[in-house]
């Protein structure tokens, strides 16, 4: 019976003192999280802090060793994701669970196919339902498009639709903005607000403090598997959150001296590259990167960045034009030949191009060098030397593994996978380091670390090419910013003499705002 004068809070989810162990490793150490109805509750923590583990417990992918879960006040045993779905809990995963050559509709109904006459899958009606859902929440998804033909932002909307189609009232978003452009992030935030208006409740796992401040009502912080506490977003600030998250003060602005560029390391002349459909995505592009400077490429996703990187690294054929690296023509050379000419590559898709997920992290660190005299004699690999090198990089780059270099790469959090890739590439001491979305999905502590490493490479006289969709990252780290639009570099600007607004306009292809004679190279 309610006591007069006492305000009762309706929690739709209560995770009370959850404990999850893997062997002797404690991933969640008695963590409590309470989600109110109709709120966006952020779950904040470093890479490997145990955020995804906690949400996988809620979604039934893991069983906890201790604690209990209440859904709408009732204790529930969530033994698998189907139980979670039945309780109205849906999860939008960081790495999308989609079949590339299926349509949007086929992906959404997969596992709960609507039947006609009891056995024929009724795709037409499903497509109509999905279209209606898509319009209701402003998701703007074509039900008949194939997954492989739509952007990353659209794929994420498909994941959201998947949960809504199954009747989810509580949505878990795991790092939803990790691979989105600033515009797509803006759209996603609007979608989240719309979901809340429709009576949904959201748990948001993220590292991005700005997003937390913009969108969440409350924040629960976890550090190294332990709950640090829950704070009201309106009563805190990014600096406080960062300190709670990593246990120390974090410097958001990377300190660096002025660049001192010397000779040219990379020269790209009139480059033309087509995508898988034969459509030209890079169009007569010119670019140069010199020793001792970081050149940032700013642009909205889909303007030829991926094709440009793949052409430089030998992963995609060049239609015409030249790529000169260390005074050698590497156009259409094999990736290994280009790598040996002095290239390091932190790829934008760590799973597809950065790691072999079923290999140990130690073997992944040796992927580029296992055949060199340092690790092999007469074709026989010295695994002791590989282990030694891997452990050295793991220590130097603070890769949190659980079981050292013998840990499978897939068992690491996204951030630790990224640190291992960066360690591998930097350790090879390349003359040109291409860093494509190097901080995607990383926490502020890891971002600070990676920015420092990139500047360190520059200060050692290396050339660094940074591709990022994070405008503040491009502004913060680059010495020069080349703006790419529709497959061409439309302008090169000095980050000290421009603003995010001007950059945004250039990225959208608008170069008319520049005043004659204003003296600012934007």
Image (cartoon, helix red, strand yellow):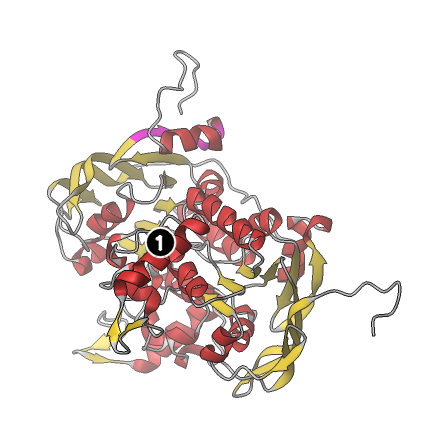
Which residue occupies 63% across, 67% down?
Answer: 222
Please provide percent x and percent y for residue 272. 15, 39
Tell me which segment is drawn in magenta: 490-496
* Camera-nearest residue between 35 and 228: 35
Place of residue 41 in the rendered image (x, y in percent of width and height, measured from the top left): 62, 60
In terms of depth relative to the viewer, which is nearer, 496 or 511? 511
Image: 47 above or below 178: below
Query: Is residue 494 located in the magenta-colored stretch of the structure?
Result: yes
Single out the residue that lies furthest toward the top.
517
Q: Which residue is mark 1?
A: 131
147 lies above or below 389: above
- Say whether residue 197 is left or right of residue 244: left
Q: Residues within 10 Å of mark 1 (few under 14, many from 20)?
A: some
Task: Kindly indicate the quadrant of the structure image that contains residue 337.
Answer: bottom left
Vertical relation: 9 (above or below) 177 = below
Residue in the image at 35% along x and 52% along y: 154
Q: Is residue 229 visible?
A: yes
Give how far across and how far down residue 196 sits, in percent: 57, 54
Residue 102 included in the magenta stretch of the image: no
- In the rendered structure, the answer to whether residue 162 lies left or right of residue 343 reads right
Residue 368 appears in the rendering? no
Residue 363: which quarter of the image?
A: bottom left
As helix, strand or loop, the secondary structure at mark 1 comes to helix
Locate the C terminus by quadrant. top left
Image coordinates of residue 39 in percent, x first then y, are 63, 57
């Amino acid at each position: 019976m309610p006591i007069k004068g006492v305000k009762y809070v309706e929690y739709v989810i209560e995770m009370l003192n959850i404990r999850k162990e893997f062997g002797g490793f404690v991933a969640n150490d008695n963590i409590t999280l309470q989600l109110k109805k109709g709120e966006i509750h952020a779950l904040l923590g470093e890479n490997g802090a145990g955020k995804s583990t906690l949400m996988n417990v809620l979604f039934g992918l893991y069983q906890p060793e201790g604690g209990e879960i209440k859904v709408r006040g009732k204790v529930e045993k969530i033994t698998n994701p189907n139980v979670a779905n039945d309780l109205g809990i849906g999860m939008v995963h960081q790495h999308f669970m989609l079949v590339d050559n299926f349509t949007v509709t086929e992906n959404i109904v997969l596992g709960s196919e609507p039947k006609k006459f009891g056995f024929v899958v009724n795709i037409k009606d499903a497509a109509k339902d999905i279209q209606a859902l898509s319009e209701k929440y402003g998701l703007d998804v074509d039900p008949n498009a194939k997954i492989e033909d739509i952007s990353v932002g659209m794929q994420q909307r498909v994941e959201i639709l998947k949960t809504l189609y199954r009747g989810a009232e509580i949505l878990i978003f795991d790092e939803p903005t990790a691979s989105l452009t600033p515009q797509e992030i803006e759209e996603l935030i609007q979608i989240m607000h719309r979901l809340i208006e429709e009576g949904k409740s959201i748990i948001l796992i993220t590292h991005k403090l700005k997003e937390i401040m913009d969108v969440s009502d409350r924040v629960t912080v976890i550090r190294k598997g332990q709950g640090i506490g829950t704070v009201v977003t309106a009563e805190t600030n990014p600096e406080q959150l960062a300190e709670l998250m990593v246990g120390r003060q974090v410097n958001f602005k990377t300190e660096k001296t002025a660049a001192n560029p010397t000779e040219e390391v990379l020269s790209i002349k009139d480059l033309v590259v087509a995508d898988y459909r034969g459509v030209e995505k890079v169009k007569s592009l010119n670019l140069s990167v010199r020793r001792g400077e970081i050149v940032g490429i700013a642009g909205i996703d889909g303007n030829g960045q991926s094709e440009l990187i793949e052409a430089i690294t030998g992963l995609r054929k060049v239609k015409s034009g030249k790529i000169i690296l260390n005074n050698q023509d590497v156009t259409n050379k094999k990736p290994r030949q280009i790598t040996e000419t002095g290239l390091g590559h932190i790829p934008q898709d760590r799973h597809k191009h950065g790691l072999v997920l079923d290999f140990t992290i130690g073997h992944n660190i040796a992927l580029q060098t296992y055949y060199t005299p340092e690790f092999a004699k007469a074709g026989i690999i010295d695994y002791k030397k590989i282990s030694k090198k891997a452990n050295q990089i793991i220590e130097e780059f603070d890769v949190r593994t659980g079981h050292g270099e013998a840990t499978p790469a897939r068992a690491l959090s996204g951030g630790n996978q990224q640190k291992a890739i960066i360690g591998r590439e930097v350790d090879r001491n390349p003359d040109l380091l291409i860093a494509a979305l190097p901080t995607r999905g990383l926490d502020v502590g890891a971002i600070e670390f990676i920015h420092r490493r990139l500047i360190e490479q520059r200060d050692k006289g290396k050339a660094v090419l940074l591709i990022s969709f994070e405008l503040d990252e491009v502004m913060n780290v680059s010495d020069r910013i080349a703006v790419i639009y529709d497959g061409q570099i439309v302008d090169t600007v000095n980050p000290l003499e421009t603003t995010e607004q001007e950059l945004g306009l250039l990225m959208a292809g608008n170069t008319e705002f520049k005043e004659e004679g204003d003296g600012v190279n934007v």
